[in-house]
Image (tube, grey):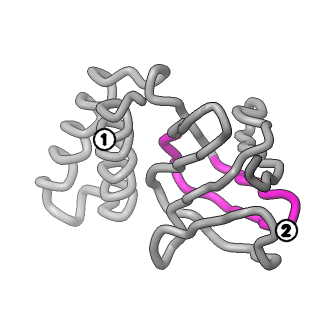
Amino acid sequence: MAKTFRLEIVTPERTVFSEDVVSLVAPAERGYLGVLAGHAPLLCTLKPGEIRIRREGGEILFATSGGFMEVTPKRAIVLSESAEAPAAIDASRAEKSKQRAKERLAQPAKTVDRDRAQSALARAENRIRVAKKRL
Protein backbone atom coordinates (compact mmCIF):
# COMPACT_ATOMS: atom_id res chain seq x y z
CA MET A 1 0.00 0.00 0.00
CA ALA A 2 1.44 3.35 -1.07
CA LYS A 3 1.82 6.23 1.35
CA THR A 4 -1.08 8.65 1.12
CA PHE A 5 -1.94 12.18 2.19
CA ARG A 6 -5.20 14.09 2.46
CA LEU A 7 -6.14 16.31 -0.47
CA GLU A 8 -8.92 18.86 -0.39
CA ILE A 9 -9.97 20.97 -3.37
CA VAL A 10 -12.19 23.83 -2.26
CA THR A 11 -14.08 26.46 -4.29
CA PRO A 12 -16.20 29.32 -2.92
CA GLU A 13 -19.32 27.19 -3.46
CA ARG A 14 -18.23 23.84 -2.01
CA THR A 15 -15.57 21.26 -1.28
CA VAL A 16 -15.10 19.62 -4.68
CA PHE A 17 -12.76 16.80 -3.57
CA SER A 18 -11.68 15.46 -0.18
CA GLU A 19 -9.89 12.09 -0.10
CA ASP A 20 -6.63 10.40 0.72
CA VAL A 21 -4.46 10.29 -2.40
CA VAL A 22 -1.11 8.87 -3.51
CA SER A 23 0.04 11.85 -5.59
CA LEU A 24 -0.99 15.20 -6.96
CA VAL A 25 0.28 17.21 -9.92
CA ALA A 26 -0.89 20.83 -9.98
CA PRO A 27 -0.28 23.80 -12.34
CA ALA A 28 1.93 26.10 -10.27
CA GLU A 29 2.90 29.50 -11.67
CA ARG A 30 6.36 28.29 -12.72
CA GLY A 31 5.32 24.90 -14.06
CA TYR A 32 3.57 21.76 -12.93
CA LEU A 33 4.38 20.71 -9.37
CA GLY A 34 4.23 17.13 -8.06
CA VAL A 35 3.29 16.31 -4.48
CA LEU A 36 3.69 13.02 -2.58
CA ALA A 37 3.08 12.14 1.07
CA GLY A 38 5.74 13.70 3.29
CA HIS A 39 6.28 16.71 0.99
CA ALA A 40 8.01 19.69 2.56
CA PRO A 41 5.69 22.54 3.59
CA LEU A 42 4.87 24.76 0.64
CA LEU A 43 2.55 27.60 -0.32
CA CYS A 44 2.20 28.53 -3.99
CA THR A 45 -0.08 30.18 -6.52
CA LEU A 46 -1.72 28.10 -9.23
CA LYS A 47 -2.51 29.09 -12.78
CA PRO A 48 -5.35 27.71 -14.92
CA GLY A 49 -4.53 24.13 -15.78
CA GLU A 50 -5.08 20.48 -15.09
CA ILE A 51 -4.92 18.94 -11.63
CA ARG A 52 -4.02 15.25 -11.92
CA ILE A 53 -4.69 13.09 -8.87
CA ARG A 54 -3.55 9.51 -8.39
CA ARG A 55 -5.37 7.49 -5.79
CA GLU A 56 -5.41 3.79 -5.10
CA GLY A 57 -8.52 3.41 -7.27
CA GLY A 58 -6.96 5.11 -10.31
CA GLU A 59 -6.53 8.64 -11.61
CA ILE A 60 -8.88 11.59 -11.63
CA LEU A 61 -8.56 14.99 -13.33
CA PHE A 62 -9.89 18.45 -12.58
CA ALA A 63 -9.75 21.62 -14.65
CA THR A 64 -8.88 24.53 -12.39
CA SER A 65 -9.03 28.26 -12.95
CA GLY A 66 -5.97 28.87 -10.79
CA GLY A 67 -5.78 29.79 -7.13
CA PHE A 68 -3.55 28.76 -4.24
CA MET A 69 -2.17 25.52 -2.84
CA GLU A 70 -0.86 24.81 0.64
CA VAL A 71 1.08 21.59 1.23
CA THR A 72 2.18 20.00 4.50
CA PRO A 73 3.67 16.52 4.94
CA LYS A 74 0.22 14.99 5.60
CA ARG A 75 -2.15 17.28 3.72
CA ALA A 76 -2.64 19.49 0.65
CA ILE A 77 -5.35 22.09 0.17
CA VAL A 78 -6.17 23.67 -3.18
CA LEU A 79 -8.23 26.87 -3.03
CA SER A 80 -9.60 27.75 -6.45
CA GLU A 81 -12.33 29.87 -7.98
CA SER A 82 -13.41 26.75 -9.91
CA ALA A 83 -12.47 23.09 -10.21
CA GLU A 84 -14.34 20.77 -12.56
CA ALA A 85 -14.10 17.06 -13.30
CA PRO A 86 -14.08 16.26 -17.04
CA ALA A 87 -17.62 14.84 -16.93
CA ALA A 88 -18.93 18.09 -15.43
CA ILE A 89 -17.53 20.30 -18.18
CA ASP A 90 -19.96 21.53 -20.82
CA ALA A 91 -17.64 21.37 -23.85
CA SER A 92 -19.95 23.38 -26.13
CA ARG A 93 -20.19 26.16 -23.53
CA ALA A 94 -16.40 26.15 -23.19
CA GLU A 95 -16.04 26.40 -27.00
CA LYS A 96 -18.38 29.41 -27.01
CA SER A 97 -16.35 31.04 -24.22
CA LYS A 98 -13.18 30.44 -26.21
CA GLN A 99 -14.70 32.02 -29.31
CA ARG A 100 -15.92 35.08 -27.34
CA ALA A 101 -12.46 35.56 -25.82
CA LYS A 102 -10.82 35.34 -29.26
CA GLU A 103 -13.28 37.90 -30.65
CA ARG A 104 -12.50 40.27 -27.76
CA LEU A 105 -8.77 39.89 -28.35
CA ALA A 106 -9.24 40.74 -32.04
CA GLN A 107 -10.75 44.13 -31.13
CA PRO A 108 -8.65 47.28 -30.71
CA ALA A 109 -6.77 47.37 -27.40
CA LYS A 110 -8.50 50.58 -26.27
CA THR A 111 -11.94 48.93 -26.14
CA VAL A 112 -10.99 45.63 -24.46
CA ASP A 113 -9.40 44.56 -21.20
CA ARG A 114 -6.76 42.36 -22.84
CA ASP A 115 -5.58 40.70 -19.61
CA ARG A 116 -9.12 39.66 -18.76
CA ALA A 117 -9.72 38.36 -22.29
CA GLN A 118 -6.41 36.40 -22.22
CA SER A 119 -7.41 34.85 -18.87
CA ALA A 120 -10.84 33.90 -20.23
CA LEU A 121 -9.20 32.31 -23.28
CA ALA A 122 -6.76 30.31 -21.11
CA ARG A 123 -9.59 29.04 -18.87
CA ALA A 124 -11.74 28.02 -21.83
CA GLU A 125 -8.88 26.21 -23.58
CA ASN A 126 -8.02 24.41 -20.36
CA ARG A 127 -11.63 23.27 -19.83
CA ILE A 128 -11.78 21.97 -23.42
CA ARG A 129 -8.46 20.12 -23.03
CA VAL A 130 -9.52 18.46 -19.74
CA ALA A 131 -12.98 17.57 -21.09
CA LYS A 132 -11.30 15.62 -23.90
CA LYS A 133 -9.23 13.59 -21.39
CA ARG A 134 -12.06 11.81 -19.63
CA LEU A 135 -10.27 9.01 -17.77
Image location (x, y in percent) of residue 119? 38, 56
Q: Indicate left or right for 36 with 6 as reference.
A: left
Q: Is mark 1 on a helix, strand or loop?
A: helix
Q: From what the image shows, is residue 34 above or below residue 87?
A: below
Nearer to us of marks 2 and 1 is: 2
Residue 114 colored in magenta in the image: no
Q: From what the image shows, is residue 111 above or below residue 9?
A: below
Q: Report the predominant secondary structure element of the magenta stretch.
A: strand
Q: From what the image shows, is residue 98 above or below residue 120?
A: above
Query: Which residue corresponds to the image point at 52% horizontal and 39% vertical from the top-left?
Result: 62
Q: Which amino acid does label 1 sit on?
A: Arg
Query: Which residue corresponds to the image point at 82% horizontal and 77% vertical from the top-left?
Result: 41
Q: Which mark is residue 72?
A: 2
Q: Residue 73 carries which label?
A: none
Q: Is mark 2 on a helix, strand or loop?
A: strand
Residue 79 colored in magenta in the image: yes
Q: What residue type is labelled 2?
A: Thr
Image location (x, y in percent) of residue 101? 25, 45
Q: From what the image shows, is residue 28 above or below residue 63?
A: below
The segment highlighted magenta reads 62-80
Quadrant position of residue 107: bottom left
Query: Which residue corresponds to the image point at 59% horizontal and 40% vertical from the top-left?
Result: 82
Image quadrant in which the C terminus is located: top left
Query: Circle 1 sits on which residue?
Result: 129
Q: Nearer the viewer, residue 114 or 53?
A: 53
Q: Which of 60 and 117 is in front in this view?
A: 60
Image location (x, y in percent) of residue 92? 27, 21
Q: Distance between the residues labelled 2 and 1?
A: 30 Å
Q: Determine crowd level at label 2: few under 14, some 14-19, many 20+ residues with C-alpha closer than 10 A.
A: some
